[in-house]
Image (cartoon, rainbow, N blue to C red):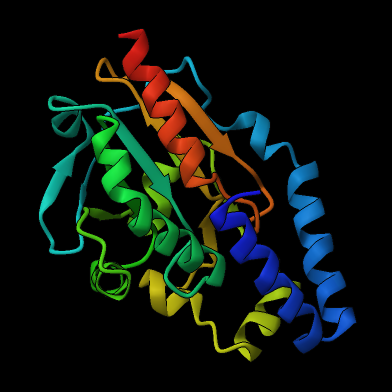
Amino acid sequence: MGVLSDAIDAYNSEKIKQIPTETLEIMAQATSDLKASGIEDRALKAGSRMPEFELPNQYGELRRVSDYLKDSPVVLNIYRGGWCPYCNMEMKALHDALPMIEAAGARLVGMAPETADKAELTSLHHELQIDILSDKGNLVADRLGLVYELPEVLRPIYQGLGIDIPAYNGDISFILPVPATYIIRQDGIIAYAFINADYTQRMEPSEIILQVGLLENAA
């Protein structure tokens, strides 16, 4: 196992104790339905070209993916928002692994549908010295084939847990991206893609470092 997966397993063990079984079953069924929808198959994969896009970072500064790629390969980590405990565990793990990701030769960039001010809170909370891009409206995530709408059956459950997705996204929608990690070569081609419709599953930082290293060795 890995550092991130161990943290997720520990969280899931506590989650089972605190959340009613019926609620957990609803959550699990929603995940199963999303997987069955084929969204993973429709998402952009390794071998495809990452489309050019421009988004504001957490400080409101516009950033283009092509500008990042001028200097190094990019690890683009797409998460649901700072309200998501699994995203927060992932962000902590990425913070801890950032020196090694950069030493391997890549730049880490985050992206979420949350507003720029929420993205800034996420970066401050995890002390992440990286750009976190605000993909308001999921316009870029949609081009990557990652977007879905949170099922209505889950909305009151999330609300009961104190999660206000529209407040984070700055609109009235419940549109979210499937969490994903893309490792992009400097020529814009995706070298590796981790896409899992089960939001509790994330790419281990050690695997990111390994894949970046393989990319450098193949250059």
- Residue 132 against residue 45 in the figure, above or below: below
- Residue 151 against residue 187 in the figure, above or below: below
Please identify the quadrant where the C terminus is shown.
Answer: top left
Front position in the image: 116 or 136: 116
The answer to whether residue 189 of the structure is visible from this angle is no
The answer to whether residue 85 of the structure is visible from this angle is yes
- Residue 103 against residue 4 in the figure, above or below: above
Kindly identify the residue that appears in the image at 75 percent across and 45 percent down: 35
Q: Position of residue 123 (x, y in %)?
A: 27, 67
Front position in the image: 89 or 122: 89
Whether residue 71 sits left or right of residue 52 in the image: it is left
Q: Position of residue 44 (x, y in %)?
A: 51, 28
- Residue 3 against residue 143 in the figure, above or below: below
Kindly identify the residue that appears in the image at 66 percent across and 77 percent down: 155
Kindly identify the residue that appears in the image at 69 percent across and 64 percent down: 9
Whether residue 65 sits left or right of residue 157 in the image: it is left
Q: Position of residue 126 (x, y in %)?
A: 32, 69
Kindly identify the residue that appears in the image at 41 percent across and 64 percent down: 92
Q: Position of residue 206 (x, y in %)?
A: 48, 41
